[in-house]
Amino acid sequence: MVRNSAAPGGADRLRIRAGVVKRKIGARIFLAFAVQGSLGGAGARAAAAQRAPENVVLIVSDGLRWQEVFRGADTALVNRRWGGVEDTTALRREFVRATRDSARAALLPFLWGTVARQGQLLGDRDSAGDAAVTNGFKFSYPGYSEMITGHADPRVDSNDGPPNPNLTVFEWLARQPDYRGRVAVFGTWDAFPRIFNRERSGLPIRAGWEPPFPRPADSAQALLDHLYAGTTRIWGDELAYDAFMQAEVLDAVRREHPRVLFVGYGETDEWAHSRRYDQTLESAHRVDGFIAELWNTMQRIPQYRGRTTFIVTADHGRGPTRETWTDHGHDVEGAEQIWIAVLGPHTPPLGVRRTDAPVTQSQIAATLAAALGLDYGAAERSAAAAIAGAVTR
Ligand SMILES: [Zn+2]
């Protein structure tokens, strides 16, 4: 997929930092006032905790197929001819298993060890029902746009397209008092500033290869800037490495405590386009580990513990056969098929969900808002309804 756009600007991170400092001071004053007022001590803290807004994270592994998510490694692709696999013995040892259950658990241990037990997974066509994109394009920009705006738009028809003309749920949340300055977007693909319409939305967006910490606060940040600046770029300027971005995301979570977060991992798509099934599986396995790391990091922080919902998905599917698994787009049958995972305090632990009607990518925006107790459909009439039963509060 041809991907190009202007590099993102550097002022955003500074903007969110400054905003957080102001809010922290504000919260401290409020808390001091509450403790001194008629509500005393623990009672005041409990009341404040109840009123405090919750948190939500939307995570995308670009173009990761439902086939790998629900079936694990596809043995028809663990070879040089169809999968471009360099070391089939090593790949078999790592990801090929005798059963479907053990294969998918080996590939995606957090999804199958934690999300399947404590949350929900949608889109298992082998047993439970469909999840699909409703835009007919089946490539990235229209897919990300559908999931964050709540509807497909025929005008959003190119990865090189202009800034998104539609309202996104992230922009909508950032306008509300509880979330102003507490929304953050991270993605390895340099198209995200256009997809989230940075100019109009004012959202802090970190995308692509820009050094994340132009004024590093410590040696860890300086090292990460050094790696961003000095590492050879496999996919040119358009896509940075997931592992580098992960370090930025964890840093932002620890320091800035965003309440609404987008995290876009890109390697799963690129390796598949390159017909490298070994690297595709490796990337998917690493993304699963990054999600686990983010979840566990957040659960150690009081703001997030027991008060955070994760929604994990893909922007599009890919072809189902050994010929077409590398590709997606409007002419690729099956590339409309995606999967959606939900984990959080308001998500009933139903595991692999059976759904009568197909769920759609367009339902993700309203589901994300519903996890915060908010109705996105009231603001964006074109948005599809939240996924029934995915968050109940
Ligand atoms: Zn692609």
Image (cartoon, rainbow, N blue to C red):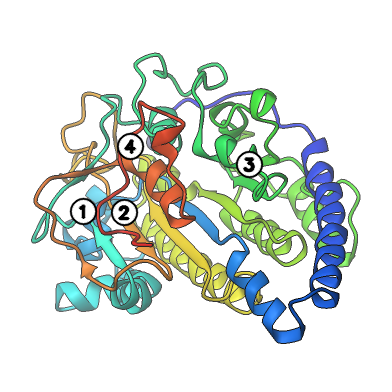
Which of discs 3 and 4 lies nearer the camera? The answer is 3
Give the structural element (helix, strand or loop) at label 1. Answer: loop
Mark 2 or mark 3, whichever is nearer to me: 3
Pick whichever, 209 or 276, lies toward us: 209
Q: Crowding near pointer 2: few (<14 within 10 Å), some, many (20+)?
A: many
The quarter of the displayed image where residue 393 is located: bottom left
Q: Report the mark closest to the observer, 4 or 1.
A: 4
Is residue 194 positioned above or below 60 on the image?
above
Quadrant in which the N terminus is drawn? top left
Q: Which amino acid does the dot numbered 1 rest on? A: Gly
- Cα–Cα gap, marks 1 and 2: 7 Å
Dot 1 or dot 2: first in sequence order is 1
- Identify the residue shown where x is 26% and y is 70%: 104
Mark 4 element type: helix
Q: Measure the C-alpha gap from mark 3 to mark 1.
A: 32 Å
Residue at which label 1 appears: 123
Alpha carbons under labels 3 and 4: distance apart:
22 Å
Can you identify the residue that label 3 sits on?
176
Q: Which residue is mark 4?
A: 362
Q: Which residue is mark 2?
A: 340
Residue 38, given in percent of the width and then of the height, sits at 77, 76
